[in-house]
Amino acid sequence: MSINMQVLDNTLTKENIKHWFEHLQERICKTIADIDGKATFEIDIWSREEGGGGKTRVLKEGKILEKAGVAFSAVWGQTPTKILEALKLENADFFATGVSIVMHPHNPHVPIIHMNVRYFEMSNGVWWFGGGIDLTPHYINKEDAQFFHQHLKNACDAHDEAYYPKFKNWADDYFYIKHRNETRGIGGIFFDQLNDKPKEQIFEFVKEIGNSFVPIYSHLLIKNHEKHFSEQEKKWQLIRRGRYVEFNLVYDKGTKFGLDTNGRTESILMSLPKEANWEYQFEVESNSPEAYTLSKLKKGISWI
């Protein structure tokens, strides 16, 4: 796919965008740590030899969250040949900044959540925004799924009513584990190479999505973290985490971009859970909650 080239708008600079993403990381970490009530986010500042660096914040063994990572980065330099070829770009230097979040709870009834918001530009004038947010329940709860998708639709509709259906379908296609013939979770929204409107206008939409993380996940954490769970449900959680790992290592574009640009491996792989399981030919019981969840891991489900 070729990228549309637009003249850079000097009223919104890459530094403005970078600083907003960095502050978003701080706000999310503070709120989530307060809700967890036990652990805090450890800060790991790193630099990239070719240019730039980042700040990775990781929470370990909290009261509610087993592992949570919120990574901010701003990197620049010569664009790797592999990326130029994959995106059909002309050779030029690049700048990329963004925030990526993944949270893995202790309780199987609390879903995994992922969000990424990012900006990319090149010295020849090419620029775009990308990102998205998706939910991966170990056990699908219809009420929670409706809440999640309605919140995203409201956020999208505030900027363009065409966004939600378009980006929801994009998420269904993107967060799909082809070799399992199942979606990673209940989807959400996903968008990439977004540059068809003025930069300030698209950035306002990206900020809306970034700001949606706290109200969405705070609600789901508080609502579900005290629910009782069995040993069988914990086993299922670890198996579903295994599916999450498979997607991130095989298909995730952010993982590939980070590795291709010589990013920091620990920060790139902070999205992986502390523990996951793979059981050979694991089968679920008919009419079980596990079977219900598997039946809903499909593209094209309308949750609202």
Image: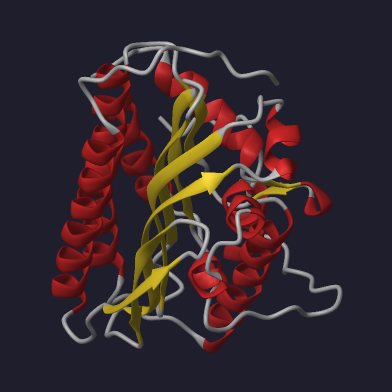
Q: Residue at x 24, y 63 (%)?
A: 223
Task: Give the vertical position of 108 relative to 113 (above or below).
Answer: below
Query: In the orientation shown, which residue stands out farthest toward the right?
Result: 281
Label total for image: 0
Q: Residue at x 60, y 61 (%)?
A: 262
Q: Quadrant of residue 210?
A: top left
Q: Locate the N terminus and report the quarter of the image it occupies.
A: top right
**Could you tell me residue 190's position as x and y percent?**
50, 35
**Could you tell me residue 253's position as x and y percent?**
63, 47
**Could you tell me residue 100's position as x and y percent?**
41, 55
Q: Is residue 170 visible?
A: yes
Task: Give the vertical position of 192 relative to 8 (above or below).
Answer: below
Q: Quadrant of residue 291?
A: bottom right
Q: Residue at x 24, y 33 (%)?
A: 208
Q: Locate the C terminus and report the quarter of the image it occupies.
A: top left
Foreground: 181 or 72? 72
